[in-house]
Amino acid sequence: MNHQPFEEWLLNDKNLTPVEKRELNSHLRTCVHCTALSATGLALRSANVVAPAAGFSMRFQQRLAAQKIAERRRRLWGVIILVLSGLGLFGWFAAPAIYSVITAPVEWITVVIGYFLFAITSLQAVTEVLAVLVRVAPGFIPPYVWMVFVSALAGFGLLWIVSIWRFSNRAPQGVSA
Amino acid sequence: MNEETAWVTQAQQGSDEAFTKLVETYQTPVYNLCYRMLGEPDLAEDAAQETFLRAYQHLHRYDQKRPFATWLLSIAAHYCIDRLRRRKFSMFSMDAEDDEGNTFELPDPDSPDPEAETVQGQTRDRIQSMLKDLDDTDRAAVIMRYWYDYSEAEIAASLRLTVSAVKSRLHRARKELAGLWQEEETRIETERRPYESPAF
């Protein structure tokens, strides 16, 4: 049996003219398929809206409060675990140094001062080299190279910031704006 | 600025009281969608609560250019679809069932016309049980179309589909429902026949 155009009318919930209505009714008298389509359409349109049991928002507030407590607890445990593991790692790496400080303090102080002096002199040397480079380099490097370099640096920085932002703002399924 | 927009703005600024107003306003549509999707009151309650919780946690993402109801129902629909997919692995029903596994509901004796109420109740049950046989996303589209009068464009935006995909899903679902309806009619006819008077 040919269901067109009646099936299309029923599926698209078309507003029918009186003539079309008559045609549809006479088709429905002979077509079981379109009758079922029409009946399900009517049933869907007349279906009721089910309301939740009384006190829904109260139950939501309780659930929200429990969720906030759980979240706070999770964060606290996170901080505790982070601090403890940091302290553990620090202890692990610092243990030999601490041991040497306790057993031979003078030797340790001499080593520290030596390192300190080495760092200061290295820093001074690096600063002087950089100062010379800054004075001399602009003469050799054309300005457009600087512009390209600075632009590339800014581009990478922007890309990095956008990636971090997008990653940290990713919503679960269905929670998009 | 209307009342709802004001509540949303206040809730976005951290007012729990304003969010509670939103919960009170939208609890029925959200619960109804969850109930129609999941088919069980307990699961629907849990899903509706979870929907509001997710909305609360991600309220800063809500774009006020879009209707709040659409955003909320979109969260509910996606949550229910996810839940149904997970449930397929460990499925069991908590519905009241008779010996043959059919769900049933007693008619309300206080209603003015108990017979009409029973017939309406049976039709509602039929639709609810037939909805269960639809694909999860098709079911969400049908619910949004017939319970919330959403346009195809609104359904597409909520379910992240194209308008033509929504249209074809709605058509497919309607045909599937009609097929199930027909099967049910045939079954009822066959059951009725043995008790009919030979005179008819």
Image (cartoon, coloured by chain):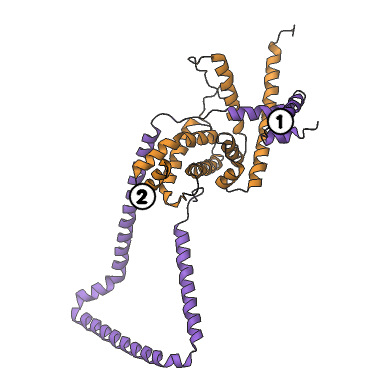
Chain colours: A purple, B orange
Instruction: Indicate the position of residue A76 as horizontal and vertical percent values.
Output: 31, 53
Identify the mark at residue A17; answer none if there is no mark. Answer: 1
Quadrant in which the C terminus of chain B appears: top right
Residue B118 lies left or right of residue B61; in this view the side is right
Question: What is the crowding at mark 1: few (fewer than 14 residues within 10 Å), some, or many (at least 20)?
Answer: few
* Element carrying mark 1: loop
- Which amino acid, mark 2? Gln
Nearer to the camera, B23 or A76: B23
Corner quadrant of residue B16: top left
Instruction: Indicate the position of residue A83 as horizontal and vertical percent values.
Output: 30, 60
Nearer to the camera, A15 or A97: A15
Rendered view: A51 above or below A147: above
Quadrant in which the N terminus of chain B appears: top left
- Which amino acid, mark 1? Thr
Dot in front, 2 or 1: 1
User: Residue reaching furthest left?
Assistant: A106
* Element carrying mark 2: loop
Q: Residue at x 30, y 56 (%)?
A: A80
**Cα distance between the residues tagged 2 and 1:** 51 Å
Q: Residue at x 47, y 44 (%)?
A: B68
Residue located beneath label 2 in the image: B13
Asked if residue B51 can be seen in this view, the reply is: yes
Contact flag, marks 2 and 1 (Cβ < 8 Å): no
Asked if residue B99 can be seen in this view, the reply is: no
Instruction: Indicate the position of residue B40 as horizontal and vertical percent values.
Output: 51, 31
Rendered view: A54 above or below A81: above
Instruction: Indicate the position of residue A92 as horizontal and vertical percent values.
Output: 31, 68
Nearer to the camera, A30 or B85: A30
